[in-house]
Image (tube, rainbow, N blue to C red):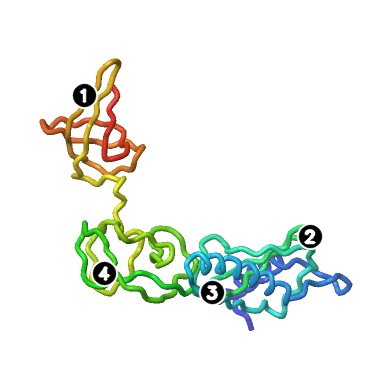
Amino acid sequence: MISDTVLPRVLACLLAWFALTGPTSAQEAQENPQALTAAARSYLEELAGATAQATGGVARIVVGSPDPRLKLADCPALQAALPPGARRSGKTLVVVRCVGGRAWQVFLPAEIHVEAPVWFTAHALPAGHILALDDLVQRSMEIGTEEGDFRPLTVRNGVALGQTLGRPLPEGVVLHGSDLRDLSRVAPGDAVSVVYSGVGFTVSGEGTTIGAASPGQSVQVRMAGGTIITGILGDGHVVDVRI
């Protein structure tokens, strides 16, 4: 017997199930469950394959089967994608939608694995160190298809040699893009050249930044005499102040 407290939750689940699948009649053609798995696999293989090719790695994809109790209307075209917030490596979910027919969508469990050679530190390195070949060693590890500065720097496309470390690193840790300092960016306390320009004149000086900024952004600078000015950071740690 279902209690009064459990019944509302059961009804809510049933309503969500009905909204997801929609009703089908015995006469209506139904979608082949294997087509859902194939669409999901094809999408994930393309996603992981592009990463593997770019990094010199190897991709492996696992896709779970849909619930056999699902009764989905036959669909003229299936579209697979990662839902918002889904992981791009390891265990995740992939959504398969019907486009051009009756609207429905199904979430399938999946796994995305991409293993590639990446850079590890060969010994402890201080902040500000310029990386050389003997500072790094190659090892294989799983990188998935994650993107951004926190992705491990791979041997094939991770430009690490000659870059400057933004923070100290111990021996034997993987190198990430976030570990490298963007030399075009300034941090608080960095020395900069300040160029005042106006109609018919240009004056330069030296100062230190109060905040962080990237080229094209506004930044405050404390001049040698203590005056604080605001200008636009350009290339080569030059701050432009228009008068």
In the rendered structure, the answer to whether residue 68 lies left or right of residue 147 reads right
Decide which of tag 2 and tag 3 comes sooner along the chain. Answer: 3
Vertical relation: 217 (above or below) 11: above
| Mark 4, secondary structure of its residue | helix
What label sits on residue 203 in the rendered view? 1
Image quarter for residue 1?
bottom right
Residue linked to disc 4: 134
Image coordinates for residue 157, horizontal then vertical, percent: 43, 62
Image quarter for residue 206?
top left
Q: How far apart are marks 2 and 4 (CA)?
A: 59 Å
Q: How crowded is mark 1: few (under 14 residues within 10 Å), some or many (20 or more)?
A: few
What label sits on residue 101 in the rendered view? 2
Judging depth in this view, the residue of 105 and 20 nearest the camera is: 105
| Mark 3, secondary structure of its residue | strand
Image coordinates for residue 40, horizontal then vertical, percent: 65, 70
Residue shown at 28% from the left, 15% from the top: 200
Judging depth in this view, the residue of 175 and 14 nearest the camera is: 175
Q: Which amino acid does label 3 sit on?
A: Ala
User: Which quarter shows the C terminus?
Assistant: top left
Decide which of tag 3 and tag 1 comes sooner along the chain. Answer: 3
Image coordinates for residue 149, horizontal then vertical, percent: 39, 58
Q: Distance between the residues labelled 2 and 3?
A: 33 Å
Decide which of tag 2 and tag 4 comes sooner along the chain. Answer: 2
Image coordinates for residue 127, horizontal then vertical, percent: 21, 59
**In this rendering, which labeled residue sits more in front, label 4 or label 3?**
4
